Image: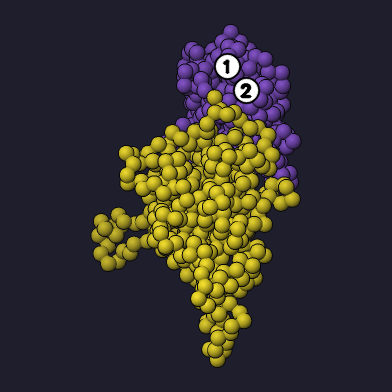
Chain colours: A yellow, B purple
Amino acid sequence: MTTIAVEQSVEGNAGAHQAGQVAMVFDLNKCMGCQTCSVACKVLWTGEEGEEHEWWMTVNTQPGLGTPKGWEEMGGGIKDGKPVAGHQPSRAEFGGGWTFNYEEVLYGGKGAGAHLHPVDPGDGSTRWGMNWDEDQGGGEYPNAYYFYLPRLCNHCTHPVCAQACPTGAMYKRQEDGVVLRDETVCQGARFCMEACPYKKIYFNYARNVAQHCILCFPRLEVGVAPACARQCPGRLVFVGMRSDPEGPIHKLVDEWGIALPLHPEYGTEPNIYYVPPLAPYRLNEDMSIDYENPRIPPEYLESLFGPRVHDALGTLRSEMERVRAGGTSEMLDTLIVYRWPELFGPFTTDPAGLDRRPEAVAVSLTTKPAS
Amino acid sequence: MQVVAVRDDPGDPGAPVWEGVPSETVALAPVPLDAQPNEYIRTSWASRPYGSVREVQVAATKRGETLFVRLEWTGSGAERREFTDGAGVFFPSAEAGDGPTTMGSRAAPVRLWLWRERLAVQAGLPAATDLVSRGPGVFRPSEDGAASAPVGAVSAQAGKAWTVVLSGPAGAGDRMGVAVWDGANEERAGIGAVSSAWIALDGNASQTSKKEGQ
């Protein structure tokens, strides 16, 4: 029988006595917005009824409203040690998961008079989608700019989602820090969706349970990297144990300080990190180069990654200068990723060589272990 | 409250058998905020009113080994977006000393038959679930639910008025509490209205088992 944590602290079930923490680093300078990570996740985990609108992995163009629409203004998180009230994203704010008027177009006898379009079920979900504002970005010609921001559950050190769950269905695994939900216990109250400041929890209306990225934990358990990382053609997603001093995660985050959490002010201490994007220099009105100012406003990057972003970008630039001057840089070599498996820390097993797909055991493993 | 033994099926809210069954008006009050199970819920509802349904008509019948509880109330009638209306009846274990206002506790869990209005997309879900409650919203599936008679519900709505008949094993208990959730006000889990005192179920006592609801 499982144990219910009726009264949880802001710590939730997290962190204090945790054996390890799986973490990821996304190098935004290499992300080309191809959505291969999104599709890899979608194909693997959210293909059933009720999951049509669920994209546990998304890539959005920044600046932008993202997904769900305007998520950065929806509250949640932790401030001064206290949970902050948040908004539960609606089906319309997530959007997507559309059905189309195939019957009318293909069999309606209307010929060219009928055109394919999504059919809104009445909840407004056809007015937004997981990547609705793709490539709009910000700025004005000739200094328009944008970059891509992949997002998934941050598997936070202080998972306020788990703290907000009244049933105790949500928990943070002691062995690797993955935040999971026992779907046999979840009653669909959705306080987790309100409390999560990153709004990466979805609601499965058909099954009356909330759902979110499980960090491909059945793959991790057999040494296979999460699908979003392994499928990424840009070689930009690092996976590993945060505490491994020889691993790239520790070096990028703790040693070199060039990988930062998104919105650190939300207070939950994410375990997904980002190498912030460098940018071309701005152009002056006469089209000469303004070497003093990057095209992506530093204050915008600070609004995303906190004040440490300036030091991180400065470190990246100085390393690039060193290499341009003929020197070497372990940091840049790490970011270039000459050998693909080096991205995945201890999770380098090829799933094609396994007897069975690790994902096949996931349904039974979502049950919270006895404590 | 008298549990009236009946021959005809009382499962439908409009079944004629209910016409001869006396009902009681039961007052409801919001589940206390300080009893909510975590700081997030207490914080996020600190300045929001809830428990908007303040009374419910309750009647009960027994047919064979099945207890039927009919609940009638007038809801807000407001548009429900993310959350639907709901109602439930609680049965304490024989040892439970507390009232129903906290929906049970860890020391004294209660059995909960929970009905929630279903959306069209939720057609595959049961109308009611058999749960054990250990506090406001601290609900878990009943572990012995599959071994006993299934819990069910049939609902009818006319304007703002709901009539719901919940049914389950008659041995659930000889006392019960009642709760109602207003979906338009995003009420769910421990955010709802609950009766302040147990309702004695006269005529159901012989079916009571101390194991139920634990």
- The correct choice, above or below, for A182 with respect to A266 in the image is above
Q: Residue at x 67, y 22 (%)?
A: B107
Quadrant assignment for the N terminus of chain A:
top right
Kind of residue at badge 1: Glu
Q: Earlier in the sequence, mark 1 or mark 2?
A: 2
Task: Judge from the rendering whether residue B134 lies leftward or rightward of residue A32; answer left or right.
Answer: right
Q: Residue at x 51, y 40 (%)?
A: A209
Determine if residue B165 is in view.
no
- The correct choice, above or below, for B141 with respect to A88 in the image is above
Q: Residues within 10 Å of mark 1 (few under 14, many from 20)?
A: many
Task: Judge from the rendering whether residue A245 lies leftward or rightward of residue B35; answer left or right.
Answer: left
Kind of residue at badge 2: Val
Q: Which residue is mark 1?
A: B212
Please determine if labels 1 and 2 lie on a single subunit: yes
**Helix, strand or loop for disc 2:** strand
Q: Chain of mark 1?
A: B
Q: Which residue is mark 2?
A: B110
Where residue B61 appears, as percent x and y from the top left, is: 55, 17
Q: Residues within 10 Å of mark 2 (few under 14, many from 20)?
A: many
Q: Nearer the viewer, residue B24 or A251?
A: A251
Quadrant assignment for the C terminus of chain A:
top right
**Helix, strand or loop for disc 1:** loop
Give the residue furthest to the top: B206
